[in-house]
Image (spheres, grey):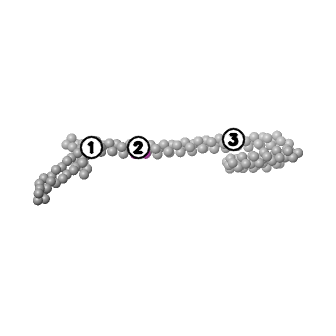
Amino acid sequence: MEKRYIHKQGHIVWVILTGSAVPDASGMVMYAIAQIQDITAKKNAEAALRQEQEELHNLAGRLIKVQEEERKRIARALHDDLSQRLAMFCVALDLLRQSLPASFCNDFSRQHGIAAKIVHEGDLRKFLRWWESLYFEYYRKQWAT
């Protein structure tokens, strides 16, 4: 069995205590044999290993948290950049509308309103589908004439 003793100098000593009874011919115990093995170094190494594993676990948890925060920061930065670019696109569309002849303005104003709504929603896929349809519609009209 493992036991913990306090040394006379005050530090803890861990031991494995093994004991056996030695009987005589009639089965009566003549004497006992005990063996004590110092396992303090082993116990200290196990405690150090547990502490290192706990620190490693905590460090891995902090690393995951920092990575997630960085992903969120990058996602915000990309979203903000995209939103700004789309807003500038709407401004450019508005400037373009102002320079178009009156015959184009009604259709263009309707399309500009759609673009502004999509930009406000922040849906890039929807915006790209809208832009693609507008592009093909424009060239379809050009080819038809």
For marks 1 and 2 on the same chain, the one whose residue lies earlier in the sequence? 1
Identify the secondary structure beneath mark 3: helix
Q: Position of residue 106 (x, y in %)?
A: 83, 48
Mark 2 or mark 3, which is nearer the start of the sequence? 2
Does the image show residue 120? no
Q: Is residue 105 left or right of residue 5?
A: right
Residue at x-position 24% and y-position 44%: 38
Front: mark 1 or 2 = 1
Instruction: Determine contact: label 1, label 3, CB under 8 Å.
Output: no
Residue type indicated by callout 2? Glu
Mark 2 packing: few (<14 Cα in 10 Å), some, or many (20+)?
few
Q: Residue at x 19, y 51 (%)?
A: 19
**Quarter of the image where one finds residue 50:** top left
Q: Which residue is mark 1?
A: 40
In the rendered structure, does residue 56 fall within the stretch colored magenta? yes
Q: Does the rendering let one see residue 86?
A: yes
Say which residue appears at 28% left-offset and 42% top-offset.
41
- Identify which residue, 18 or 80, lies in the foreground: 18
What residue is pinned by disc 2? 55
- Labelled disc at residue 85: 3
Element class at badge 2:
helix
**As drawn, is 134 to the left or to the right of 76?**
right
Q: Position of residue 48 (x, y in %)?
A: 34, 42
- How far is the residue under mark 3 from the one under mark 2? 45 Å
Amino acid type indicated by mark 3: Arg
